[in-house]
Image: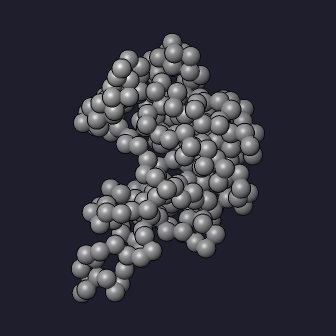
Amino acid sequence: MSFTVLVPARLASTRLPNKPLADIAGLPMVVRVAQRASQSGTARVVVAGDDPSIVAACAAHGVQAILTRQDHPSGTDRLAEACEQLGLDGDDIVVNVQGDEPLIDPALIDAVASELAAHPECAMSTAVHEIDSLDDFLNPNVVKAVLDAKGNALYFSRAPIPWWRDGSAGGAPPSVLPSPQPLRHIGIYGYRAGFVRKFPSLAPAPIEATEALEQLRALWHGHRIAVHVSQVAPGPGIDTPEDLARVRAVFAAQLAP
């Protein structure tokens, strides 16, 4: 199996300006992400940036990068342009690794690519892991997923799903986790390149707008999403200065003599 990792990187960030270029142990964040992704079985890693400074930073450290438009409404739209620029075949597998996850597990990237390769009936793949905290289950910032008998996604939601009727007296939130264990969605996606190019032309789904979850557009239009169940939680991503400080501390500990 051959696949390409694409890393969309947008310079503007409300909570962390110039996030892709933030220094982590002497290297820009987006370079750290690309280096981590290159440890997977991918044929190549390409950063899709929206600013020449991102492309220049990648080039300075031997990372392939292409310049994409600044007006893309989402990372998936940026991926669609990248697939066009790279001339990828419609059946080629692409894994979208977020540009703010320098601690992503390379094995998770391989698993998401393999999941899609093993399910030709699916247009996408993604990953989940079991939730072991009631607070996470009830937290709307933790996206939950439910799967069908074949391991494909039925639905994603910010609500605590599946809702345990008998564990929720009088409609109150449950006091313990339901069984079987609920699943947390991990924000990594595999695509067939042809579907990535098609995705921006699909009409946004009402459920997508309600939940603020772009992957629901694919389900709403009848496309299947294969799901890998990971045994471990992913490394922390970076959205805020506090997140950046924590990840810098991890790298400092790893690189300490």
Say whether residue 163 is left or right of residue 96. left
Residue 200 appearing in the image: no
**Location of residue 110 with respect to 167 vertically, above or below:** above
Q: Quadrant of residue 250?
A: top left
Say whether residue 16 is left or right of residue 162. left
| Camera-nearest residue between 5 and 81 | 5
User: In the displayed image of the protein, which residue is found farthest to the front?
Assistant: 257
Q: Quadrant of residue 80?
A: top right
Residue 238 appearing in the image: yes
**Location of residue 146 with respect to 170 vertically, above or below:** above
Say whether residue 9 is left or right of residue 125. left
- Residue at x 38%, y 28% (from the top left corner): 254
Say whether residue 224 is left or right of residue 147. right
Visual colour scheme: one colour
| Camera-nearest residue between 67 and 257 | 257
**Location of residue 6 with respect to 31 vertically, above or below:** below
- Residue at x 71%, y 51% (from the top left corner): 117
User: In the displayed image of the protein, which residue is found farthest to the top?
Assistant: 60
Give the image location of residue 157, x and y in percent.
42, 64
| Camera-nearest residue between 209 and 163 | 163
- Residue at x 31%, y 63% (from the top left corner): 133
User: Disc count in the image?
Assistant: 0
**Location of residue 234 with respect to 100 vertically, above or below:** below
- Quarter of the image that includes the N terminus: top right
Give the image location of residue 149, x and y in percent.
61, 73
- Quarter of the image that includes the C terminus: top left
